[in-house]
Image: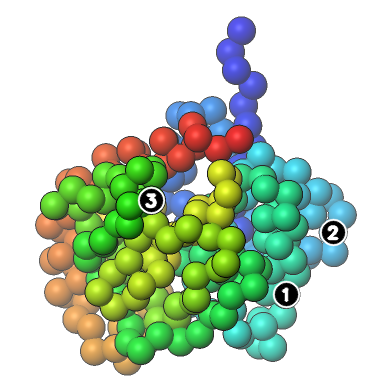
């Protein structure tokens, strides 16, 4: 008998920052996916909340807003509550970029603007814990991840740091067996990044970052980031309870 399919819910904040390379992997590994667009989602809907809360895996994706923007974007408050309960229950949770920042806030840590924008492809330095984690492929000399953030956070007391960059000490952390927070983008599909360049045009211009230079850098890594994402996420999906 085939194994029953499991259910993942992804909380999305802007359409183009989606599951990317993670979506086909989830399907191959026996997961069904529900995307919830948070800016328009009605979290008072009992059925929607049940779908999110009962999911076998909750994924919180990135976006151009921050944890401190709840006055302008009030959906962040109930979203933070969903993440807090997920962490309390020690159920599988993956946070990417904004998602990692929301996880840090849910664990009681300060989230705040960093000293500079970190946008573009770069290397990471793994901690000892990171070297033995699913992030181990990022220790390879040619491993690159996509950075796209200006906020950062203090490491939560319950968490274990997995990775750092020269600009930001806290790039990834684990909390227990089932929660993984990534400040960077392993899931970003190089073939779809043109949508990011358009969607983030104001941010790129304000940061003085050349779209053409970013496009060229993407071309140099496009051939290997798919296999890298496959290694990382497949191992993590096999490890979660």
Q: Which mark is residue 69?
A: none
Residue located at (34% from left, 39% from top): 230
Residue to which mark 3 is pinned: 129
Q: Quadrant of the N terminus?
A: top right
Residue located at (58% from left, 13% from top): 2
How far across and how far down the image is residue 98, in percent? 51, 69
How far across and how far down the image is residue 136, in percent? 30, 45
User: For this view, does 202 lie left or right of residue 80?
Assistant: left
User: For this view, does 163 lie left or right of residue 24?
Assistant: left
Gap in Å between the C-alphas at discs 1 and 2? 15 Å
Which of 169 and 66 lies nearest the eye of the viewer?
169
Residue located at (54% from left, 28% from top): 30
User: For this view, does 101 lie left or right of residue 195?
Assistant: right
Of badges 2 and 3, nearer the viewer stands: 3
Q: Quadrant of the C terminus?
A: top right
Are the residues tagged 3 and 1 within 8 Å (C-beta)? no
Look at the picture and state if 195 lies above or below 137. Answer: below
Residue to which mark 2 is pinned: 45
Of badges 3 and 1, nearer the viewer stands: 3
User: For this view, does 87 lie left or right of residue 219?
Assistant: right
Gap in Å between the C-alphas at discs 3 and 1? 31 Å
Which of 27 and 229 lies nearest the eye of the viewer?
229
Residue to which mark 1 is pinned: 77
Gap in Å between the C-alphas at discs 2 and 3? 40 Å
């Amino acid at each position: 008998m085939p194994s029953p399919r499991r259910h993942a819910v992804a909380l999305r904040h802007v359409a183009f920052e989606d599951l990317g390379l993670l979506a086909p992997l989830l399907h191959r590994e026996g997961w069904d996916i529900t995307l919830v667009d948070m800016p328009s989602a009605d979290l008072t809907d009992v059925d929607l909340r049940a779908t999110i809360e009962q999911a076998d895996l909750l994924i919180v994706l990135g976006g151009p807003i921050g944890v401190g923007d709840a006055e302008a974007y009030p959906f962040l408050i109930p979203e933070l509550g969903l993440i807090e309960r997920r962490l309390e229950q020690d159920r599988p949770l993956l946070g990417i970029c904004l998602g990692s920042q929301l996880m840090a806030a849910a664990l009681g840590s300060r989230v705040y603007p960093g000293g500079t924008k970190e946008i573009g492809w770069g290397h990471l330095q793994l901690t000892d814990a990171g070297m033995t984690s699913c992030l181990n492929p990022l220790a390879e000399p040619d491993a690159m991840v996509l950075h796209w953030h200006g906020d950062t956070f203090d490491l939560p007391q319950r968490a274990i740091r997995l990775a750092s960059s020269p600009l930001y000490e806290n790039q990834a952390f684990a909390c227990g067996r089932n929660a993984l927070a990534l400040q960077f983008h392993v899931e970003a599909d190089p073939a779809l990044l043109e949508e990011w360049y358009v969607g983030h045009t104001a941010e790129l211009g304000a940061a003085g970052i050349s779209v053409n230079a970013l496009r060229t850098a993407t071309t140099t890594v496009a051939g290997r980031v798919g296999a890298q994402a496959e290694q990382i996420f497949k191992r993590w999906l096999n490890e979660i309870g």
